[in-house]
Image: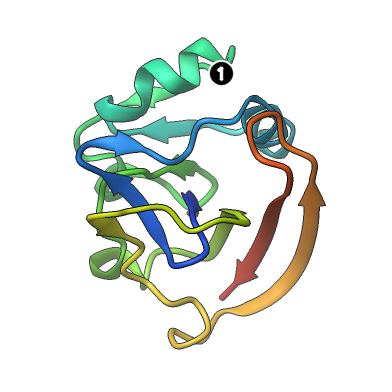
């Protein structure tokens, strides 16, 4: 499966239950990456994704039930328990540091992923969004 996350420069994902992953350019880019594949998410992310015109399959157990070709958008779940099943990790990173109380728990380089692509996007709410693609 492919997992997509959004972080600040320190790996922060959430602060006091508020997401760091809202940017319409990032969401449009995610839509182009799907190429007709199935998108899954936790109920926390449903409104964000449907509001961007994406049609996710919403499940509490999205990481457990995702298949090999599926894309899972994650904002509030740990990834380490699923690291063996994650073939590709896409990290959208804002070029800023924000307060956080939930951070990305999987370091792709330490887990043996290799960086295969880096793209800079000019975001709507962020001057620069870096998309990094890591492959197992």
Which of these two is toward me, 48 or 115? 48
The residue positioned 48% from the left and 38% from the top of the image is 21
* Circle 1 residue: 54
The residue positioned 70% from the left and 39% from the top of the image is 33
Position in image of residue 41 (x %, y %): 37, 33
Q: Residues within 10 Å of mark 1 (few under 14, many from 20)?
A: some
The picture quadrant where one finds residue 104 is bottom left
Q: How many marks?
A: 1
The picture quadrant where one finds residue 66 is top left
**7 left or right of 26?**
left
The residue positioned 37% from the left and 72% from the top of the image is 106
Position in image of residue 8 (x %, y %): 49, 56
**59 left or right of 34?**
left
Which of these two is toward me, 102 or 133? 102
Which of these two is toward me, 130 or 107? 130
Where, quadrant-wise, is the C terminus in this rendering? bottom right
Position in image of residue 32 (x %, y %): 74, 32
**55 left or right of 85?**
right
The residue positioned 48% from the left and 22% from the top of the image is 49
Position in image of residue 29 (x %, y %): 72, 35
- SS at mark 1? loop
Q: How is the image coloured?
A: rainbow
101 to 50, vertically: above or below: below
């Amino acid at each position: 499966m492919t997992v997509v996350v959004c972080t600040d420069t320190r790996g922060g994902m959430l602060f006091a239950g508020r997401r760091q992953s809202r940017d319409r350019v990032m969401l449009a880019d995610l839509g182009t990456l799907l190429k007709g594949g199935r998108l899954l998410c936790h109920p926390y992310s449903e409104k964000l994704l449907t509001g961007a015109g994406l049609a996710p399959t919403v499940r509490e157990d999205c990481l457990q039930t995702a298949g090999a070709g599926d894309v899972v958008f994650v904002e509030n779940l740990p990834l380490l328990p699923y690291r063996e099943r994650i073939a590709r990790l896409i990290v959208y990173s804002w070029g800023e540091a924000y307060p956080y109380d939930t951070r990305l728990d999987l370091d792709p380089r330490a887990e043996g992923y290799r960086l295969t692509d880096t793209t800079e996007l000019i975001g709507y709410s962020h001057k620069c969004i870096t998309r990094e693609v890591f492959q197992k």
